[in-house]
Amino acid sequence: MVICPDSEACLNWARTHQNISTVCADVYTMYAKSIGLSTDENNRPLLCDLDDGDVVNLEIVMAVLKGNPLLEHINDVIDRIVEAGIFMQWTNRFIDEAKISTKATLSYPLGDEYLNISIKHMQSAIYLLMFGCALAFLSFFIEIAWHKLISKRRLSHVKTKNTSREQVELFVNYVLHHIKCDTRNTE
């Protein structure tokens, strides 16, 4: 057993001489593979992985005062980040950016993962679409009802037993009255 003060030195020793075993984080090994540190010129791995790779579970904590009102919100955000896979997305983005920045030869294309999009992925868009359709139908029916109400008010001033000439006179008087009211309101 050898005590390594620096994990980078131990990993370099393992890559170069291949006579030492060491434990390191998965993120670092993926990073080293992505920039070509742990592969030779023929893209063969210089370091071997364990079959059941978990050796140590690392827990990262954030200190918050007891009774802090934001504690539940912080826990909720952290749980959602982990459950949604955002941390893994950040890790993959970091590794892809490292590949691009070092211009390493890629053993696989960056977009090789497929996502099967289902109704669950489109649920919010479907709800928004249904809400928009309901709002459109509601406004359509309100407009029809409003038009019928206004047309009934206009025709209530005109008696149905009047002759057509009387109806025309009533309609002209009605229009002139509203034009006068509108001009007074604008002045």
Image (cartoon, rainbow, N blue to C red):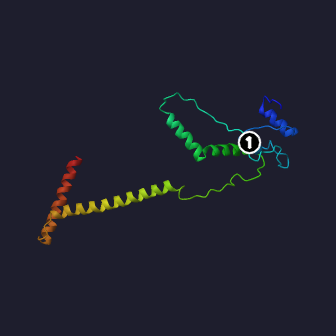
Residue 91: x %, y % from top left: 67, 43
x, y percentage for residue 176?
18, 58
Q: Is residue 122 left or right of residue 187?
A: right
Q: Is residue 179 above or below residue 73?
A: below
**In the foreground, 167 or 24:** 24
Front-most of 95 and 151? 95
**In terms of secondary structure, where does tag 1 sit?**
helix
- Amino acid type at mark 1: Tyr
Residue at image coords 50%, 36%: 72
Relative to 179, does residue 62 appear above or below in the rendering? above
Tell me what residue is drawn at x 21 percent, y 51 percent.
Answer: 183
Task: Residue 4 in the image: state x and y as whole percent.
Answer: 80, 30
The residue under the point 61% across, 58% down is 116
- Nearer to the camera, 90 or 63: 63
Q: Is residue 27 left or right of residue 166?
A: right
Q: Quadrant of residue 156?
A: bottom left
> Residue 104's spot in the image, x, y percent?
77, 46
Which quadrant of the figure has residue 47? top right
Tell whether 125 sits left or right of 152: right
Q: Nearer the viewer, residue 89 or 10?
A: 10
Quarter containing the N terminus: top right
The residue beneath circle 1 is 31
- Report crowding for label 1: few under 14, some 14 to 19, many 20 or more residues within 10 A (C-alpha): many
Residue at x-position 58% and y-position 46%: 83
Horizontal relation, residue 31 to residue 151: left or right:
right
Q: How many marks?
A: 1
